[in-house]
Amino acid sequence: MNRLKEYYKKALQNHFALGAFNFNNMESLQGIVNGCKKTNAPAIIAVSEGALSYIGDDFIIELAKGAKASFTHLFLHLDHGKSFEICKKAIDLGFDSVMIDGSSLKFGENIALTKMVCDYAHKFDVQVEGELGQLKGIEDNVYASDHHFTDPLQAKIFVERTGVDSLAVAIGTSHGAYKYQGEQTLRFDILQEIENLLPSFPLVLHGASTVDKELVDKFNSYGGKLEHAVGVPKDLLIEAIKNHNIVKINTDTDLRLAMTMQVRKVLSENPKEFDLRKYLGKGREEIERVVMDKNQNLLFSANKID
Ligand code: G3H
Ligand code: 13P
Ligand code: ZN
């Protein structure tokens, strides 16, 4: 069985979640790997379509090889694949897992596309994540001015008809650094209904960065201008992991903030510095710190390796 599938099972049974950490360059990947290794935490290293084209196919595969050689409990995942072709490409390249994101399509079209990806992926024992419902804000270059929460009945039909291995649900999170204007809450009632209809099925939360005030304040103190940035409150994520079936938590924004804060710090404190190892190295350390903290205190994935 695919080892990631086994980890999802273990996460469901033991109420922890795997971090799905997006990376965009070698240093961000190294920060994630070091953080997971030091906490003995299995995790997903995620690549968006944008990151794949930025880094390039060959480099992604070699970087992932290096990451796994350093710590074997890491799984390479395509984040927000929008077409059969991009998912097939990732599968053919050797990814462990792909997300087919048909969430902006009509229900029937999303089912047909997701099923097509599952049928192909499963021949190679690759895991597939689907998405139903839409996150508020920018998602995959589609702007939704409001949440389109996942419909629990549709979720059941979607899983049965497609054969997906996990499902990303929309219950009130959103991508980026500006997640809430009003009440900071998640729709646990909808999550519970989904779980009643799909017991013991691995569910995923996107847009789960916590955008910690301390990090944002530091970012701003070194010349950044992120005003009114708000993430998902930690206690809501812990509730989703401990009392529900969320087994994968996606984080990109917090890692970007961490690295960029350190780059700003080093450059603003040392205006004569131009050795890129000095600022990217500090950025890498900051990502490691954030990943360790999440694995230990938010996801409870620390010391969960098999
Ligand atoms: O969910 C989306 C990720 O944050 C990826 O963002 O498309 O800018 O790489 P990106
Ligand atoms: P954040 O923007 O909250 O980090 O979400 C990342 C994500 O969902 C990647 O798929
Ligand atoms: Zn996402």
Image (tube, helix red, strand yellow):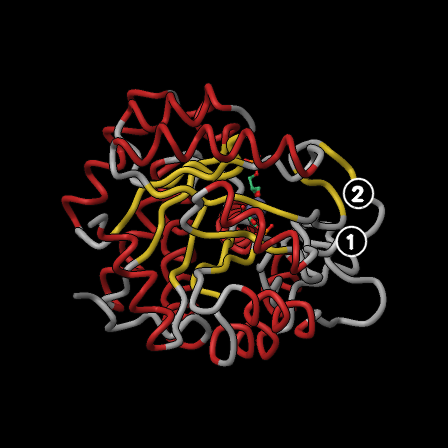
Residue at the spot 64% in from the left edge and 61% down from the top edge: 216
Residue at the spot 43% in from the left edge and 34% down from the top edge: 274
**Along the horizontal axis of the image, is 169 left or right of 275?**
right
Q: Residues within 10 Å of mark 2 (few under 14, many from 20)?
A: some
| Relative vertical location of residue 23 with respect to residue 15 in this rendering, above or below | above
- Residue 277: x and y in percent read 34, 39
Q: Amino acid at mark 1?
A: His
Q: Does the beta carbon of the residue at mark 1 sit less than 8 Å from ligand 3?
A: no
Q: Residues within 10 Å of mark 1 (few under 14, many from 20)?
A: some
Q: Which residue is mark 2?
A: 144
**Along the horizontal axis of the image, is 305 left or right of 277?**
left
| Relative vertical location of residue 111 with respect to residue 16 in this rendering, above or below | above
Which of the 4 image quadrants contains residue 37? bottom left
- Residue 263: x and y in percent read 50, 46
Q: Nearer the viewer, residue 254 or 269?
A: 254
| Relative vertical location of residue 155 with respect to residue 218 in this rendering, above or below | above
Q: Can you tell which mark lies on residue 108?
A: none
Residue at the spot 23% in from the left edge and 29% down from the top edge: 62
Q: Nearer the viewer, residue 170 or 266?
A: 170
- Residue 241: x and y in percent read 48, 73
Q: Nearer the viewer, residue 205 or 175?
A: 205
Which of the 4 image quadrants contains residue 126? top left
- Residue 238: x and y in percent read 52, 77
Residue at the spot 70% in from the left edge and 56% down from the top edge: 151
- Secondary element under disc 2, as helix, strand or loop, is strand
Q: Which residue is mark 1?
A: 147
How far separated are the C-alphas under marks 1 and 2? 7 Å
- Secondary element under disc 1, as helix, strand or loop, is loop
Q: Amino acid at mark 2?
A: Ala
Tell me, yes or no, whether the two marked residues, 1 and 2, touch with CB atoms within 8 Å. yes
Q: Quadrant of the C terminus?
A: bottom left
